[in-house]
Image: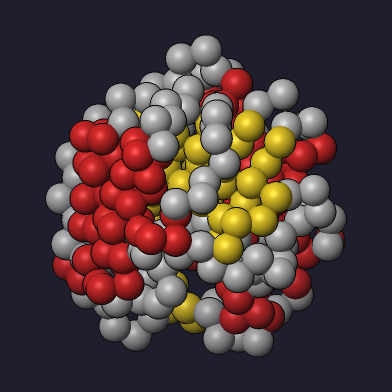
Amino acid sequence: MARILIAGCGYVGSALAASLVRDGHEVWGLRRRIAALPDGVHPIEADLALASSLSGLPPELDFVFYLASPAGADDALYRAAYVEGVGNLLDALESAGQRPQRVFFASSTAVYAQRAGEWVDESSSTEPRHFSGRRLLEAEQRLADGCPAATVVRFGGIYGPRRTRLVERVRTGAASYHADPPRYTNRIHRDDCVGVLRHLMQLEAAAERYLAVDCEPAPEKTVLDWLAGTLGAPPPRRAETDDPAARGNKRCRNARLLGSGYSFRYPTFREGYAAVLAGAA
């Protein structure tokens, strides 16, 4: 049985915490408000951006998962959630003399800025143009500098239970796509996020970073057409305007993750969205 801290016990973190408790681990969930934590998870009410609130971390932690998300979509909030939060947590662990076996950090494919549908992997260049990617990359570096036993997991777009905005846009005929050139999307179901993190925790020696996306980067039109056909909804509209320079467009390769032995529950968007639509996920 391991002693595990989940710092940022939200959408993915709560599902991970519940899974780890079922496995028999002792799990602490840290978040700003603790009312929504799963049964069996020890609550820690704290703010990762406020160093003074992290003085009471549980001792003898074996693993730490940093799964925080910002309180809003602006640069200051991203800096607080990621750069400052990672630094504060590492400092708190250091002050308590703790050396977890491994610290996992949930990053994002937003750190990539490729625009022409290129394939990217863990070694591809990272030159993000948007503040979100820049702050995540800064946090990744802060973690690497402060923790030799660190693994960064760059997740694609996370969907799953209760995250049905795209489904509703298709259902109502509000969805549109960019076709020239095709815009590729990289996704992963919430349950596979949990599966990936549990899998990496069990590895004898996890790598420094992994891309966590499913097995089929797909043009957004392909995804929307499939959803519309499944729902019996109107076909998606082609967007009237598009500026390829204003957005990223890449295909993320998950070969390293597959090579580590992970098997996807939902290997493509089709299986994942079918489960969402059926209410089975």
Rendered-image quadrant of the N terminus: top right
Most foreground residue, 63 or 132: 63
Count of numbered labels shown in the rendering: 0
Residue 251 spot, x, y in % from top left: 37, 45
Query: Image quarter for residue 142?
Result: top left
Residue 121 higher or lower than 224, as above or below: above
Q: Residue furthest top?
A: 204
Rendered-image quadrant of the C terminus: bottom right
Res 235 visible? no
Residue 108 higher or lower than 59, as above or below: below
Residue visible at 34% across and 36% down?
94
Residue visible at 35% across and 39% down?
95
Residue 217 spot, x, y in % from top left: 46, 46
Residue visible at 53% across and 79% down?
175
Query: Image quarter for residue 23?
Result: top right
Residue 232 higher or lower than 160, as above or below: below
Residue 111 spot, x, y in % from top left: 27, 51
Res 148 visible? yes
Query: Image quarter for residue 19?
Result: top right
Residue visible at 22% across and 66% down?
131
Residue 79 spot, x, y in % from top left: 27, 64
